[in-house]
Amino acid sequence: MNLNFTQLAAIQKAKEAVDRFRRNHPKFPIFLDAVSKNALKNGTLIEITVTTPDGTRYESNLKLNNEDMELVEMLTSLTKNI
């Protein structure tokens, strides 16, 4: 796969953003690592809550199935190279 300069620059910019996020939120990558190693399996329930500064809450959940696990495995392998 050949990348042009614009694509390489975009990848570099994304990597810098990820690095900055990791510096700003050092415990979150540790949490994600623990979850990815120990909790992501068929039947796992993932619950997400987002609260805005004004107090509005958005909540959702999902139960992982075998097809979801295929996606998780693909994303895990991609992010190992970032």
Image (tube, rainbow, N blue to C red):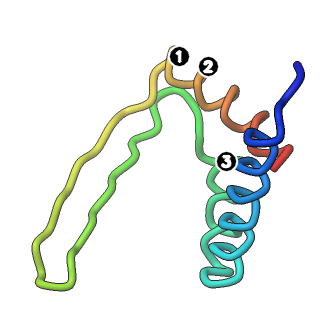
Label 3 belongs to which residue?
A: 36
Residue 64, percent across and down? 44, 30
- Marks 3 and 2, how far apart at CA: 13 Å
Residue at 53% x, 16% y: name it: 66
**Front residue of this view, candidates 35 and 16:** 16
Element at label 3 = helix
Using the image, determine if residue 23 lies above or below residue 22: below
| Farthest front residue in view | 5
Q: The residue under label 1 is which amino acid type?
A: Asn
Classify residue 72 by image quadrant: top right
Using the image, determine if residue 26 lies above or below residue 72: below
Residue 40, percent across and down? 59, 40
**Front residue of this view, candidates 12 and 45:** 12
Q: Earlier in the sequence, mark 1 or mark 3?
A: 3
The mark found on residue 70 in the picture is 2
Q: Residues within 10 Å of mark 2 (few under 14, many from 20)?
A: few
Task: Check if mark 2's residue and mark 1's residue have beta carbons within 8 Å.
Answer: yes
Foreground tag (2 vs 1): 2
Classify residue 43 by image quadrant: top left
Task: Check if mark 3's residue and mark 2's residue have beta carbons within 8 Å.
Answer: no
Label 1 belongs to which residue?
A: 66
9 relative to 57 in the view: left or right:
right
